[in-house]
Every structure is written in structure tokens, then in C-alpha cells.
Amino acid sequence: MQTEIDKLAPGGGSLMIAWQLKGKRALLVGGGEVGASRIGHLLGADAHITLLCPEKGLHPTTKDYIAKYPNRIAYYDRRFTGPAELHKMDIVLTAIDSPATSREIVDLCRQAKIPVNAADIPEFCDFYFGAHIRDGPLQIMISSNGNGPRISALMKEKVQASLEGYEGLALSKIGQLRAELKERVPEIGGSLGRKRMKWMSKICNEWPLIDFTLLDSAMIQKLLDEGWEKDRVPTFTEVCSKPRPLGVEDSSKGHRFGSNILIPIAHFVAGAALMAAVILARRR
């Protein structure tokens, strides 16, 4: 009989984390179409990029990045030359057509204990990129663990279509509220720390996500005064003088954020499973 531990740790997956690269050094070997995509991800993570690629191999988007971010991208018109290129690098990525050169770079990175990704060669990679959705602070990654990148892309389309478009802004406002609350209650851990986390969870559960988009500094302070200080969750109308967006119910009635995301995903997974069953049946 399968236990809960077995369900949680079946193996064969990746450790899904949000890797903080702000201010860290990233070496990118290759500046073609895939390299341009990697640059976009690295810039989005506030990394400092060293790019090695002959000029003739640069994708137009890569050229635009180099021109627009001269303080973030150090570009060198040449190929990878050897171990010295890895000096002080925190992360390395290859996006080139030569598996042999990628293998050489991967081996050097392993010796230097530097995480490395070789585009289109999953067995060489310490980490994968997957399909990404980005909306301000909201980041969603879907990974097939190197098995089917196209399926990851299809899943991304399904998830993206289920989003309303204001989630990133709402999360930014929630982050401001959380920061202001931590100013009042800086304690980490302990009873106050747990109470702070519980209160934030309650308001996130009880307010429709779209209501958070209307918060400003004055309203955040009022929400803390009327909510945190009195150990309750005020309704949106108690805190906000602005009219609620059309079609949004009173926050006192609660909401089920996420159901519009989960249902399309469930349908997609069921459809994919059915298609796989049909294909297998035909092969038999």
C-alpha cells in the first residue's frame, strides 16, 4: 500500500525552486535564437551576463539586448576558449550547435562545481528552463524534466489563458501590505510571527484577488489599523473608498481563487491521457 511519503517523494523529478541570481555572474556561450531567450531569463533575474559568441552568430534579439543593456551584458566577439572563462562565474549556460563543445564546457563546470545548462542536451544539464509565465512578481514554470518541451509549452498556453491579467499587480500590492505589516511586527518566528502569517493567510483567503489591485498606501495603513490591530479581516468596503471593479462580489462572501486555473489544467491533463491511450491502442 502506497503511503503519504511515497506519494510526496516518488523520485524522478526536479527540485523546483526560485533561484535568486540578482548581482551574480552568468556565462552564456552562444547568442543565437536560444541564446537570446536565455538572455531574457537572466536579465529578468537581475544577473550580470558575460556573453561569448562570434558576431556573425548573434540573433537580432541578442543584438538588441546587447545595445540596450551595456551595463548588464559584457559581450565578447569570440568562441569559448577554455577554463579561464569560468573564473568567478556563478552559473553557466551553453546555447551552441556543437555537442562536443557543450560537453567540454559541462565537464569543466562540474570540475569547478558551477551549475550548468546545455541547451537541447538534457543529460548534460544541472537544471532546466521549462515553459515560463511572468507577470510582475508572479512567475510560473512548467517543466517536463526534459521529456517533452512541446507539452510544457501547451500547458503554459492553457495556464496563461486561465489567468485574468491582474494577478501580478495584485501580488505586488500584497507584497506591499506584507512589508508594511513586517514593519509593525518585525518578529521572525515566535507567537507574533505565527500570528502575522496567519492573518496574512486569512486576508488572502477572504478577499477576491482583484480587490488587492486597488490598494494604495493609505488603504494599506487603514487595513492594518482596522484588521491587524483588531485581530480581524475587514471587508473591502470598510477599507476602500474606491468602487469595486464590476463583476466582483463582496469580499465578505469569500471566493475560490485558483479554481479557474485548476479546471482547464485538469481538462488538459485528462485530454492528454486520453490521446496517449488512443495512440497506444492503435499501436497494439
Image: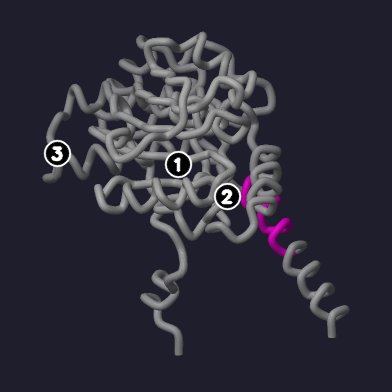
What secondary structure predominates along the stretch shown in magenta?
Answer: helix
Can residue 44 be seen from the camera position used here? no
User: Which residue, given by chain and number where applicable, does mark 3 sit on?
Assistant: 188
Q: Position of residue 133 (x, y in %)?
A: 57, 36
Q: Which residue is mark 2?
A: 120
Is residue 246 rendered to the left or right of residue 77?
right
Q: Quadrant of residue 171?
A: top left
- Image coordinates of residue 85 in percent, x first then y, are 32, 33
Instruction: Give the residue type that dot 2 points to.
Output: Asp
Pointer 2 local density, CA inside 10 Å: few below 14, some 14–19, many at least 20: some
Q: Does residue 147 appear to the left or right of 192 in the view shown?
A: right
Q: Residue furthest bottom?
A: 1
Q: Give the quarter of the figure containing the C terminus.
A: bottom right
The spot of residue 173 in percent (x, y) is 42, 22
Cα distance in 3D space between marks 1 and 2: 41 Å
The kind of residue tagged 3 is: Ile
In reply to whether residue 125 is colored magenta, the answer given is: no
Q: Look at mark 1 in the image and give the residue it sits on.
A: 205
Residue at 53% over, 45% down: 119
Residue 278 vs 239, above or below: the answer is: below
Which class describes the residues within 10 Å of circle 1: few (<14), some (14-19), or many (20+)?
some
Residues in magenta, as a range: 260-270
Query: Which corner quadrant of the image does residue 86 belong to?
Result: top left
